[in-house]
Amino acid sequence: MYLKNIKVNNFRNYKEESINLIPNINIIYGNNAQGKTNLLESIYFLALAKSHRSLNDKDLIKNEEEGFKVEADAILNNFPKKFEIKIANNRKIYKIDSNYIKSLNEYLSNLKIIIFFPEDLEIIKSSPDVRRRYLNIQISQLNKNYFKTLNEYNKLLKIRNDILKRNLKENYFDKQYFEIITNYLIDKASYIYCIRNKYIEKINDLIGNYYEKISTFKNLKLKYITNLNVDYYEYDNNKKLLRERFDELYQAELKSGVTLIGPQKDDIEFLLDKKNLKNYGSQGQQRMAILSLKLTEIEVFTKESDDTPILLLDDVFSELDDFKKNNLLNIIDDNIQTIITTTDLKNIDNKILEKSNLIKIENGKCITRGE
């Protein structure tokens, strides 16, 4: 898949702009704070209906405007598609081929995006909830049912926690209702465990090779960590194990007023030679691990959906030496649309520049149009 263009209205520092793209490498260049990252953000938003930088959609609206619109013409599996998301009157409106889409679940997983930006190091460095959020976003692009099940699980988890909290505060407990909610929760949790584990396995089949190619180091793996021993491969057996564990923790949960186990406690470790990169890896090793993860996901996404995702690389060159910059670009398949932001074209191989679409951005305007 690839975007033929991206059009933005009142998005961040853009009033109105339309930029044409090619199916291969597109390099967006210019000084800092001109709008390069904002352009990538608009593409990410168009695919996932959320920003990778802000939790509040209002932050994306240009100053003094009431809403914004992002749209693009795309090619998916060799067929043309038009995507549009608009925010107006505090409502988010989705369109595909001029048809209104009623729900986010229906809209998601059409455009598939892999993005690398400097803050992605937080996937390794930060808390487990950051890694869970990342994992959920990636899997949801491939599996609509996962996104739906995860939302249902979170709603059930809130209800269950509210029951437990009410018992602590008011000494009121409807055990029959609590057990009904718990059984539904177990059903959703079992599915989430299985899908997460399968995704991590697919990553581990490939990530070591990519890490070695771009860093020369070997033996990078991801480890999926849960707070209970579940059978990741057997959905029904998962349900049985979870039921037993919830029964064991019944009194402890009544005393604590919160659900003590479940996918909301999961984590992922990045292991290099069996050592956790969070604690023992240099920043360079961590950066290469995240880049390797993104390159691996391109291959996983392509196999799972029979179409290539779109790769966004935001300021990826700022921390890489010339060898790693060009090594990275040479690894990227020519069949994958790649959109890169950079402040400097000088250290990119001329052979790569010659086949790239060069787009200069200045103060929210496209000054130089390539193609």
Image (cartoon, helix red, strand yellow):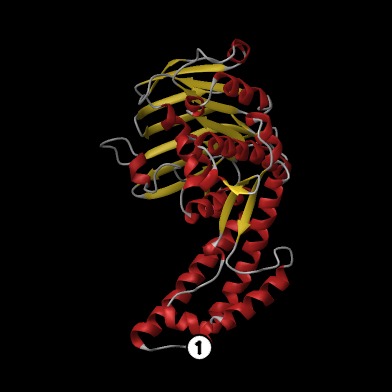
Towards the viewer: 189 or 212: 212
Identify whether 238 is placed above or below 22. Answer: below
Towards the viewer: 181 or 268: 268
User: Where is residue 231 drawn, in percent x and y?
Assistant: 71, 67
User: Where is residue 185 drawn, in percent x and y?
Assistant: 57, 73
Towards the viewer: 112 or 89: 112
Residue 334 is drawn in which quadrant? top right
Residue 4 visible within the image? no
Residue 219 visible within the image? yes
Residue beneath the point at 41% across and 32% down: 38
Tell me the amino acid under the disc marked 1.
Answer: Lys
Residue beneath the point at 49% across and 81% down: 252
Q: Quadrant of the N terminus?
A: top right
Tally of numbered tags:
1
Label 1 crowding class (10 Å Cα cut-off): few <14, some 14-19, many 20+?
A: few
Q: Quadrant of the C terminus?
A: top right
Towards the viewer: 357 or 233: 233
State left or right for residue 91 relative to residue 251. left
User: Where is residue 17 drawn, in percent x and y?
Assistant: 41, 25
Identify whether 50 is placed above or below 218. Answer: below
The residue beneath circle 1 is: 175
User: Where is residue 125 drawn, in percent x and y?
Assistant: 48, 46
Residue beneath the point at 67% across and 52% down: 199
Residue beneath the point at 57% across and 22% down: 325
State left or right for residue 45 relative to residue 246. left
